[in-house]
């Protein structure tokens, strides 16, 4: 019984350490959230060019798809 209790305590401790490490890495890995995106220009689906500045003040969703051919 004591051995099972010891395994449980070790497991819970390791899980807590792992979750704490993951949480701190995630917070450090995303310093650009809320920052202003740099302006860029891309070709759109119909062959013309579109700039991010064309959508100033509007929410923008970028969808990148690997074209075939």
Image (spheres, helix red, strand yellow):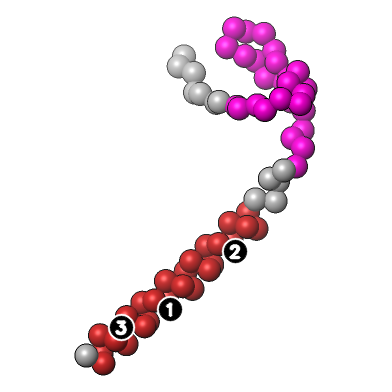
Element type where label 3 sits in the image: helix
Can you identify the residue that label 1 sits on?
A: 13
Q: How far apart, in angstroms, are the residues tagged by discs 1 and 3?
A: 10 Å
| Residue 53, quarter of the rendered image | top right
Magenta highlight range = 35-62
Please state if 56 lies on the left or on the right of 16 as rendered.
right
Whole-percent x and y of residue 65?
51, 23
Q: Nearer the viewer, residue 46 or 2?
A: 2
Q: Looking at the image, which residue sits at the far bottom?
A: 2
Can you identify the residue that label 2 sits on?
A: 24
Taking the spot 47% from the left edge, 69% from the top edge, the residue there is 18
Element type where label 2 sits in the image: helix
Q: Looking at the image, which residue sits at the far front?
A: 58
Let me know if residue 23 appears in the view.
Answer: yes
Q: Crowdedness of circle 2 by 10 Å Cα count: few (<14), some, many (20+)?
A: few
Position of residue 38 relative to residue 41, above or below, is below
Taking the spot 48% from the left edge, 66% from the top edge, the residue there is 19
Please state if 29 lies on the left or on the right of 69 as rendered.
right
Whole-percent x and y of residue 25?
59, 60
Are the residues at dot 2 and dot 1 in contact (C-beta closer than 8 Å)? no
Q: How far apart, in angstroms, are the residues tagged by discs 2 and 1?
A: 17 Å
Position of residue 26 relative to residue 34, above or below, is below
Q: Nearer the viewer, residue 20 or 44?
A: 20
Element type where label 1 sits in the image: helix
Q: Looking at the image, which residue sits at the far left?
A: 1
Q: Main secondary structure of the magenta part?
A: loop
Position of residue 4 relative to residue 48, above or below, is below
| Residue 52, quarter of the rendered image | top right
Can you identify the residue that label 3 sits on?
A: 7
Are the residues at dot 2 and dot 3 in contact (C-beta closer than 8 Å)? no
């Amino acid at each position: 019984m004591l051995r099972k209790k010891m395994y449980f305590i070790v497991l819970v401790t390791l899980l807590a350490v792992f979750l704490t490490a993951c949480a701190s890495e995630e917070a450090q890995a995303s310093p650009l959230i809320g920052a202003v995106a740099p302006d860029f220009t891309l070709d759109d689906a119909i062959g013309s060019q579109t700039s991010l500045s064309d959508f100033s003040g509007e929410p923008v969703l970028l969808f990148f798809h690997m074209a075939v051919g």
